[in-house]
């Protein structure tokens, strides 16, 4: 089984590092790099589309980012302290009060 540190249980610092690593990878818009963050048997859903495995993840991300030129992922902390993804450029940006 593959592991990518930091691993649970998370401290505040390691949780922030994990979230930042995910954001950095997604914002490269490199399907190969992003797919490597997921297990070989990952199962994804995008609206009505279902797919699994890294090859299908790469194909999906290639199609997605060819159309969504302004796509950028940011993470915001909610009042509870849990980060949530916010896609900038694809949806209206909502500020989440801290």
Image: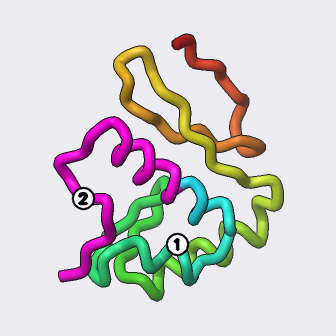
Q: Which residue is drawn at 45% across and 22% down?
A: 78
Going by the image, does 77 lie left or right of 91?
left
Q: Nearer the viewer, residue 53 or 6?
A: 6
- Label 1 vs label 2, nearer the camera: 2
Reply above or below: 91 against 55. above
Q: How many marks?
A: 2
Residue range (magenta): 1-22
Going by the image, does 89 lie left or right of 44?
right
Does the magenta run of residues contain 15? yes
Give the quarter of the image for residue 51: bottom left
Task: Please give the residue where the numbered disc 1 appears in the rendered image.
Answer: 34
Give the quarter of the image for residue 91: top right
**Residue 22 image label:** none
Residue sticking out furthest to the right: 69
Report the Cα–Cα distance between label 1 and label 2.
18 Å
Q: Residues within 10 Å of mark 1 (few under 14, many from 20)?
A: many
Give the percent coordinates (x, y) of residue 77.
Answer: 48, 27
Task: Please give the residue where the numbered disc 2 appears in the rendered image.
Answer: 7
Give the percent coordinates (x, y) of residue 18.
Answer: 41, 53
Disc 1, disc 2: CB below 8 Å? no
Q: Residue at x 73, y 54 (%)?
A: 71
Reply above or below: 22 against 51. above
Query: Looking at the figure, which quarter contains the N terminus?
Result: bottom left
Q: Which of marks 1 and 2 is nearer the N terminus?
A: 2
Q: Which of 49 and 37 is in front in this view?
A: 37
Give the percent coordinates (x, y) of residue 61.
Answer: 60, 72
Reply above or below: 73 against 32. above
Give the percent coordinates (x, y) of residue 68.
Answer: 76, 59
Reply above or below: 46 against 77. below
- Say what secondary structure mark 2 lies in: loop
- Say what secondary structure mark 1 lies in: helix
């Amino acid at each position: 089984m593959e592991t990518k540190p930091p691993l649970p249980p998370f401290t505040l610092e390691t949780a922030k590092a994990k979230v930042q690593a995910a954001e950095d990878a997604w914002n490269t818009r490199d399907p190969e790099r992003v797919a490597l963050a997921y297990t070989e048997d990952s199962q994804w859903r995008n609206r009505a589309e279902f797919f699994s495995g890294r090859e299908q993840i790469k194909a999906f991300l290639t199609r997605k980012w060819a159309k969504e030129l302004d796509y950028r992922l940011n993470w915001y902390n909610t009042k509870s302290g849990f980060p949530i993804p916010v896609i900038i450029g694809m949806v209206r940006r909502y500020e989440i009060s801290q």
